[in-house]
Image (tube, rainbow, N blue to C red):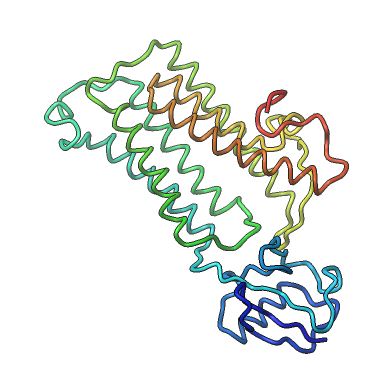
Amino acid sequence: MEIEVLSPGGKSLALLSNVNPSTTVAEIKKEVQKSKGLSIHRQAVRLEVKGPILKDEESVKNLGLRSGSKIYVKDLGPQIGWKTVFLAEYAGPLIVYLWIYFQRPWIFYGDAGRTAPVHQVVHIAAICYAVHYVKRLLETIFVHRFSKATMPFFNLFKNCGYYWLFTAYVAYHVNHPLYTAPSDLYIYAGLGFFLFCELGNLSIHVALRNLRPPGTKVRRIPVPTGNPLTVLFNLVSCPNYTYEVGSWLGFTIMTSCLPAGLFTLAGFYQMAIWALGKHKAYKKEFPNYPKGRKAILPFVL
C-alpha cells in the first residue's frame, strides 16, 4: 500500500510505497528521514493536523490506515537528549551552591563574607545540597531509563535557568553573613527528614527503573518492592515526587530559610501538575489501576 506524508500545511513530504499492515510509526519516521533528511527525533506524526501524536510502536493496521491514506508530520525543531538536559540541570546547582558556600564572594557580601563566623547548619546545608545533586547526577547516568530520547533544545535554557537561579537565590541567603540559624531541634529534625526522603526518592527511582526492561518502552503498574521505602506506592502514583518535595521541606525546616521554602513550594506546584498528569494516564491505560491511590499527596491530592 501507499501512504502520503504531508506537512501540517498540506505540503507533500513523501509518498511511502510498500507499506504493509505491520509497519510501525517508528519505521515510517525512518522512511521520512531517508526521504527528507528530517531526524526521527524531530518528527511528530499525527493522523490529523491537530490530532494526538502517535506512539512509535503503533502499527498501520491498528491505526486503520489503508492505501491512499494520509498522515501528517510536524517538525518539532532542534532537539537535545534528555540525559544531556538532566546533567546540565543538576551540575549547575551543584557548582553554583558550592561556589557561593566556599567563596562567599565579595560581590555579594563585601568584606563581611570573609570575616563573619559560619554556623554549623550552613556547613550541613552545603553538604545536603551537594548530596542531593550528586545523587541526581548519578541517577541520571546509572538509574534512569528515558521513554523519550530527546526534548526541544530551547527547553534546556528554561530548565537550567529555573534550577540555577533558584539555587543562587537559596545559597545567597543561607550563606549570608547575617544569616540566623534556627534551634538545634529544627536543624536535626529537618536534617533527619531530608535524609529519609532522599533515601526514599532513590528507592522509588530504582523501583521504577526495574519496571522497564532495557531497550523497551514497557509500561506496568508500579507497586511496592521488598524495600519498605517503596510502600508509598500503595498511596500515591508518583512517590518519587512525594519524597522530592519532602526532601526540600526537610531542607527548609533545617535552614529555616524563606527562599528555600519558596523553592519547595514552586517545586511542589510543578511536580503536582506532573503527578496529576501521570496519575490520569495510569488510570486510562490500566483498567485495573488501584482506585485508592492519589497522585502525589496521600489521601489528599
Find residue 296 and report its image quarter.
top right
Q: Quadrant of the N terminus?
A: bottom right
> Which residue does the image show at 54% across and 54% down from the upper left?
141
Relative placement, left or right, of 129 versus 214 is left
Q: Quadrant of the C terminus?
A: top right
Q: Position of residue 6 (x, y in %)?
A: 66, 78
> Which residue does the image show at 52% across and 62% down from the upper left?
81
In the rendered image of this protein, does residue 159 appear above or below residue 52? above
Frontmost residue, 219 versus 99: 219
Relative placement, left or right, of 104 versus 129 is left
Residue lying farthest to the left in this orientation: 111
Q: Position of residue 176 (x, y in %)?
A: 25, 26
User: How many numbered circles does the render carry?
Assistant: 0
Relative placement, left or right, of 42 versus 288 is left
> Which residue does the image show at 46% across and 53% down from the upper left?
87
In the rendered image of this protein, does residue 29 appear above or below residue 295? below
Q: Position of residue 146 (x, y in %)?
A: 62, 56
Q: Position of residue 272 (x, y in %)?
A: 60, 35
In the rendered image of this protein, does residue 296 appear above or below residue 187? below
Relative placement, left or right, of 300 versus 99 is right
Residue lying farthest to the front in this orientation: 9
> Which residue does the image show at 46% across and 26% down from the upper left?
251
Find residue 53 and report its image quarter.
bottom right
